[in-house]
Amino acid sequence: MNEEIVTEQEMRDARLVGFTAGGHSVLKQLWWKELSKLIGAYDSLSVLRGFIDAMFYIGNGQLDKAQDLPILQGGDMAKKRRILQRAMLFLGEAMERERFTDILGAADQELRGKGGQDANEAFYTPNSVSDLMGALVEGELKKKLAAGDIVTVYDPTVGAGRLLLSFCKEHAQHLDQIRVYGTDIEQNAIRMFYVNCMLNGIAAEVKHGNELLMEHWAVYYTPEWHMYEQDRKLKKHVEQMRAIFEGMPKPETEEQPSPVDTTQETPDQPEKMDVTILPNGQMTFNF
């Protein structure tokens, strides 16, 4: 491994901490410091995007594609997988400490640099601006959340999902009522958006497409989306079954005989009768 590259990445990562979280979270250094061990045949940006792809494929249940990523090929593949697993663990801890923060998008921008971006790439809205816009949402949405209803929020140029993350941050106590939808033309962006939602427990529909031309090439759903949808379908099924049974006529019950009145007097018993047979064969009855 090139020690100069690693040192440069550690310094770059130190700047990244200040860029994303005011310089107070050590965990944001740990996940990238671990991941930078894969730098060698691939540059830092390729390693980051391979890392994002791995989490995206794992979330979609495509483990074969995760294992076939270029950054894991060649050399000690088992060691590379362990590095990837530890980096995922550290990133999960970082997101747990500072939920709904776009760490991956910040890393992607920092590594791409402030200039010379590709034509299909863009600068993402700063987290501070996204948080402000998320806090400004009022009116019907807040009323619906307070009433326990499901609300949907959509961003047609979602990027890494910062605006939607900020909305969920503002209403985190109602997270199970929120469904987010996001579309972007850039594949890396929608994969970052997917991973951000997955690691923050957000039910999201993620589309790869161009909303201006109304073109959609692929759609993905986070595990939370599937979980909530299954729960919704189950509740709907239970309600339908309850309505069916409540609408059915109740079965008629047979008339039960009246219980025997044990207080009634028993009929008089006949008096004892004596029968005597005389020698001549006649019988006499004595009562």
Image: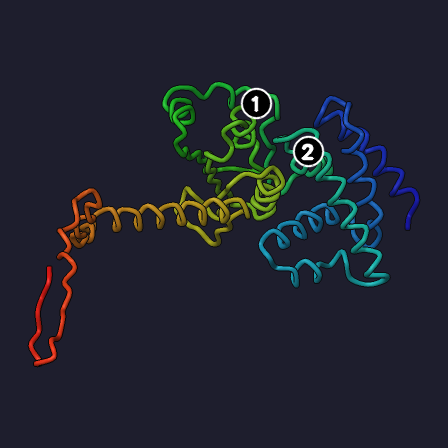
Between 92 and 47, the one lying in front of the other is: 92
The residue labelled by disc 2 is 96
283 above or below 61? below
Q: So how many labels did they put on this image?
A: 2
Q: Secondary structure at mark 1?
A: helix
Residue 57 relative to residue 273: left or right:
right
Mark closer to the chain start, 1 or 2: 2
86 above or below 163? below
How dense is the environment of label 2, judged by Cα within 10 Å: few (below 14), some, or many (20 and up)?
few
Name the residue rendered at 62%, 50% in the picture.
56
Q: Is residue 283 visible?
A: yes
Residue 28 point in image, percent of width and height:
76, 33
Q: Secondary structure at mark 2?
A: helix
The answer to the question of whether label 1 and label 2 lie on touching residues, with beta carbons closer than 8 A, is no
Q: Is residue 119 visible?
A: no
The residue labelled by disc 1 is 131
